[in-house]
Image: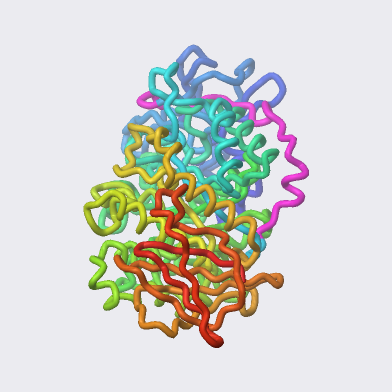
């Protein structure tokens, strides 16, 4: 590794140098700790005694070669700080770790499994015209394993169950909540101690590679949540790694996040190399097809607050990281979870942007769910909430998310959020809302359980209610996903003349019409959010019905869609809480 480039923040593969690397009949351990007075290795390879690492001059680079050490052995670093403190740490660049609450790193052979997905990787595309229907999931609570004490399937075991489900239901990608090692189950992986270590909850790095390889052979992309903003406070992790604030800010006012974690100090070039190398690691070594970056607003503004101004150091880090990742992985997707109005998030860095492929449209999510929670007689007043998103849609490449954050902490499950107490009405409104979502421009993301129509919040300690998979709502969602993928007009979001609001000559403020066009295909979605029959009147040619949310097979009333024609106008009478997708 070029040490000068490390200190100037230019390295994207620092993990090839740091960490524990198997070299012939020895393992070389390397770490960066510029303020440590002494570092020793302790582990199974030396009988848990202390073996000193040697510093290269005063560079902060420490290393030792241990003969006969082998893959699978546990180890830690014992770091002596400049103040006389002694703390045991896992390896910041370690490739595997023990299951919590244990915290040793594990010597790992990254070449143990070889991918066979060459065709997938060669054909992979980040084209904005391709369908993108993401199934977001927490791997440990998707389905419980009755034969495991913790209820978990391993990465390769879950592949046999997950892949057929994704294929059958029309998902193009699966997005995993962070799989990097973390000590607290309730953090869902968003507070890491092992940024290069797939969590041992579900097996080994080789088993994760098997899962991704099988996904690719099945035609499904894999995205992982990546956390470049903060890390867990556990003493064995990155906190005061060399006895000083090496990875974090030295002052609590900016060093501690609202989640009780430590914020990375991105002004340090060594920290930048650590994070951008971690991002590259998941894309290179595990063939992930994209990264969804968490809490991007914290990388734009100080503490994520626009009132505190842009944080120039973190913004520079983000731009350089995204530019470097796209240069190395042009067909991988970089997705921003960003709630701000900062411009150019999805423009290339060289054109003044931040370099993401997509940005979560959290404004669309908030407005849509708030509208659906409003009692029907007040919805005409608020109909602009469903129109507003298309005023700014052309500013960025957007992804419409109904994510894990919306079904936890008292926010209620998606179907629960619908107005009213009647379960049938809630499901009917949810079907309308989802047809509106899948016909609205923008890529799609839904958290697991949304497709089943669960009526209770998600918990990482539980599992999905799989009995709901036999219910009508799931059949509707299945048909909706398939329809989205099979019709180019619904996913050619940025083609010229792809979208327009359809004018309704009838006075029906709770009926929304969206016309989508691409490749000679024209579709019209009509959504009635009112609790009474509403009419849509326009000059329409003949049409066929692609999807009817009120069909009996989906749990609706099964009423036949009433259509009448007079002169040049066609009137479609939509039953209460119903939506249709028409092919003109």
Q: Position of residue 269 (x, y in %)?
A: 51, 56
Left or right: where 82 falls relative to 95:
left
Residue 114 within the magenta-colored segment of the rendering: yes
Q: Is residue 143 above or below residue 529?
A: above
Left or right: where 554 falls relative to 539:
left
Q: 334 or 138: which is nearer to us?
A: 138
Q: Residue drawn 52% across and 47% down?
A: 478
- Residue 445 visible in the snapshot: yes
Residue 362 within the magenta-colored segment of the rendering: no
Q: Position of residue 133 (x, y in %)?
A: 55, 54
Q: 32 or 161: which is nearer to us?
A: 161
Q: In the picture, which quadrant includes the C terminus?
A: bottom right
Q: Which residues are magenta?
A: 100-126
Q: Position of residue 102 (x, y in %)?
A: 38, 23
The single residue placed furthest to the bottom in the displayed view is 567
Q: Residue drawn 33% across and 72% down?
A: 306
- Residue 278 visible in the snapshot: no
Q: Position of residue 490 (x, y in %)?
A: 59, 65
Q: Residue drawn 46% across and 68% down?
A: 562
The single residue placed furthest to the top in the displayed view is 47
| Secondary structure mainly formed by the magenta segment | loop
Q: 111 or 164: which is nearer to us?
A: 164
């Amino acid at each position: 590794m070029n040490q000068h480039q490390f200190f100037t923040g230019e390295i994207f593969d620092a993990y090839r140098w740091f960490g524990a690397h198997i070299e012939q009949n020895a393992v070389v351990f390397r770490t960066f700790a510029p303020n440590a007075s002494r570092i020793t290795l302790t582990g199974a390879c030396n009988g848990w005694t202390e073996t000193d690492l040697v510093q290269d001059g005063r560079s902060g680079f420490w290393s030792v070669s241990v003969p006969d050490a082998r893959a699978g052995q546990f180890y830690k670093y014992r770091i002596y700080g400049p103040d006389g403190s002694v703390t045991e740490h896992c390896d910041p660049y370690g490739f595997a770790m023990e299951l919590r609450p244990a915290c040793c790193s594990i010597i790992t052979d990254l070449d143990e499994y070889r991918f066979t997905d060459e065709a997938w990787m060669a054909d992979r595309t980040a084209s904005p015209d391709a369908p993108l229907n993401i199934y977001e999931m927490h791997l440990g609570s998707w389905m419980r394993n009755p034969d495991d004490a913790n209820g978990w399937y391993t990465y390769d075991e879950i592949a046999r169950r997950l892949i057929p489900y994704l294929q059958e239901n029309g998902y193009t990608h699966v997005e995993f909540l962070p799989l990097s090692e973390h000590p607290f189950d309730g953090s869902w992986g968003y507070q890491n101690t092992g940024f290069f270590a797939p969590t041992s909850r579900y097996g080994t790095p080789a088993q994760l590679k098997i899962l991704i390889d099988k996904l690719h052979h099945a035609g499904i992309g894999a995205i992982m949540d990546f956390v470049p903003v903060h890390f867990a406070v556990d003493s064995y992790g990155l906190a005061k790694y060399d006895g000083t604030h090496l990875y974090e800010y030295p002052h609590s006012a900016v060093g501690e996040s609202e989640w009780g974690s430590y914020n990375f100090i991105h002004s340090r070039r060594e920290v930048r190399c650590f994070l951008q190398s971690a991002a590259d690691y998941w894309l290179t070594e595990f063939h992930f097809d994209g990264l969804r970056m968490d809490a991007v607003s914290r990388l734009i503004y100080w503490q994520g607050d626009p009132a505190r101004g842009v944080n120039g150091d973190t913004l520079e880090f983000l731009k350089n990281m995204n530019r470097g990742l796209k240069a190395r992985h042009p067909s991988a997707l970089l997705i921003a979870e960003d709630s701000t109005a900062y411009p150019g998030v999805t423009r290339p860095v060289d054109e003044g942007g931040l370099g993401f492929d997509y940005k979560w449209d959290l404004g669309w999510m908030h407005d849509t769910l708030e509208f659906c929670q409003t009692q029907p007689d007040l919805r005409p007043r608020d109909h602009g909430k469903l129109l507003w998103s298309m005023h700014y849609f052309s500013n960025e490449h957007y992804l419409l998310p109904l994510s894990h954050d919306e079904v936890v902490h008292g926010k209620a499950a998606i179907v629960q959020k619908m107005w009213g107490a009647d379960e049938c009405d809630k499901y009917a409104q949810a079907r309308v809302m989802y047809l509106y979502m899948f016909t609205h421009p923008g890529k799609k993301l839904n958290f697991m359980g949304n497709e089943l129509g669960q009526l209770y919040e998600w918990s990482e300690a539980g599992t999905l209610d799989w009995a709901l998979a036999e219910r009508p709502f799931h059949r509707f969602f299945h048909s909706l996903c398939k329809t989205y993928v099979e019709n180019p007009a619904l996913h050619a979001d940025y083609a010229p003349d792809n979208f327009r609001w359809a004018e309704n000559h009838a006075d029906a403020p709770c009926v929304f019409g969206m016309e989508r066009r691409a490749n000679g295909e024209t579709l019209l979605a009509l959504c009635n959010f009112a609790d009474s029959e509403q009419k849509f009147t326009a000059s329409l040619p003949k049409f066929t019905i692609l999807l009817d949310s009120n069909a009996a097979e989906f749990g609706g009333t099964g009423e036949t869609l009433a259509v009448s024609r007079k002169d040049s106008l066609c009137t479609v009478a939509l039953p209460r809480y119903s939506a249709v997708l028409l092919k003109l």
